[in-house]
Image: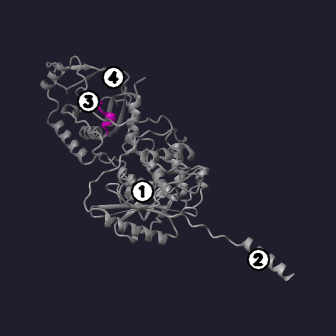
Amino acid sequence: MPMLWAFILVALLGALAVTPARAAPYAAIVMDARTGEVLHSRNADTRLHPASLTKMMTLYIAFEAVRNGEISMDTSVRISQNAAAEPPSKLGLRAGQKIALRYLVRAAAVKSANDAATAIGEAISGSEAAFAQRMTRTAKALGMTSTTFKNAHGLTATGHLSTARDMTILGRHLLYDYPEYYNLFSRKSTSAGIKTVTSHNRILNSYRGADGIKTGYTRAAGFNLVASAQRGNERVIATVFGGKSSTSRNARVAELLDLGFQRAPSKAPLRKPTRPLYAGNATSGGADSGTTGRVVRLTGVVKSSPRPMHRPNREAVQVAEAEVPVVDDVKAEVIAAAVAEAMTTAVPVLAESEAPVAESIAEPVAAPSEAPRPVLRPQDLAVTITEASQPAIEPEPASLSEPVPEQVALSVSEPEDQEIVTRLSTSGERHWGINVGRYANRYQAEKTLLRTALSEMETLDGTLRKVVRSTRGFDANFMGMTEETADLACRRLKARNVDCKLLGPSS
């Protein structure tokens, strides 16, 4: 009888015993960031749970959406019940609350906030499921062939898997595709609007030259980390999956970075990864996300810039252009100043006083593989002034919906006895325009038009730059656009924090 009770007691204790969690598989890789060469790897292609490394892709798509005008960093995002209910780590967002996208981006990058990541996905794609599909499509376009995403935050889900190699590729793309945002991953703390958040990435303090990128942890994944460091001309990226603790993971990443600096050549050609073609978003955001309406998709990159065919009367126009001076000395001074400023500052940027490095919306300088921008001719830089001489009495304020004139003058005002050569407008439905601000004097308005035209040549090339004077100042307008082109131009300019208003045809 005592033996029977002893047997029962042992069985009960065995049933109640807590089975220790199985250690997550380990994988590691270190890569020369300049060339993409793998310097060391172990289980680098094993598909594992990425945990919060997932947010690297969430942020990559957010940067892509801002650059292409789908959304802006100042867009006010309404938080859904789904986003607010995400488990920690979280920012503490409430359902129905509105918050600017820039604060969600900061919270996801620095604090690894799950509620912020979900809100970003819903703001861009309308739902987290649609955003996850876009994440997977983007991963394939980046060369992450073994990655599938099911959510925007990285909490464990069936089929939500990646590899150490794929996450290293993603880290390299973040570094070179969006360098203007890379500083987010090096911040130890930052303002997220409703509170200040701090980083989990302790290697930023412990390893010399470390400047990012992202940590991650779930029970199924273990302790993960993608880290990048630069010393002199050398930069390496190391990734660890399945660390047993944050301390051991950080130590292993430090060893990998040391190994990378030992094996990486001191001088190596910089071969930046190729950015994927932008295919836009399959769906628009919700009513309060600021992304409703038409999303224009750019599905190709210009490979060449062939010269246009001559128009039948092109020779006559060229003769007239040669005889009539393009600009006077004052206009030449304006053009020179604007061109000089545009060459040094590609896009107007609003810097944040609270951020150590401004979260610029500007596009980085094009890589050598991209098509060169077309060179503007001197006559293209001239601001065409269509106003007649100002009367003694100020005119009534000009309407911002002023239609494009039927004829566009190719020269500035000349004496009445001199012949002015014009060309008939072939704009078709180009009766739309945009306004990029009102200024105190003509000089500022013309300078802004030139600077904006140089920085946004893709959509503003061929438009009429027009300064309209009113009692309230000088309006800087671009005219002669289709509704679709004007809408796209405004989206792209607003994404760079440039004021822009659509000017429709008069009724």
Measure how far apart labels 3 and 2 are at the Cα level: 85 Å
Which residue is located at x 42 percent, y 68 percent? 203
Residue 10 numbered mark, or none: 2
The quarter of the picture where the N terminus appears is bottom right
Pointer 4: what residue? 427
Of marks 4 and 3, the one in the foreground: 3
Does 484 sit above or below residue 18? above
Which numbered disc, 3 or 2, marks the residue that appears first in the sequence?
2
Amino acid at the residue labelled 3: Pro
Which residue is located at x 45 percent, y 39 percent? 280
Of marks 2 and 1, the one in the foreground: 2
Measure how far apart labels 1 and 3 are at the Cα level: 38 Å
Give SS at disc 1.
helix
Measure how far apart labels 2 and 1 are at the Cα level: 49 Å
Q: Is residue 420 visible?
A: no
Q: Which residue lies most toward the top here?
A: 312
The quarter of the picture where the C terminus appears is top left
Which numbered disc, 4 or 2, marks the residue that appears first in the sequence?
2
Of marks 1 and 3, the one in the foreground: 1
Pointer 1: what residue? 168
Of marks 4 and 1, the one in the foreground: 1
Q: Nearer the viewer, residue 218 or 323?
A: 218
Give SS at disc 2.
helix
Residue 21 numbered mark, or none: none
CB under 8 Å between discs 4 and 2: no
How far across and down, in percent of the image, does residue 306 sit? 26, 30
Segment tinted magenta in the rendering = 456-466
Residue 306 numbered mark, or none: 3
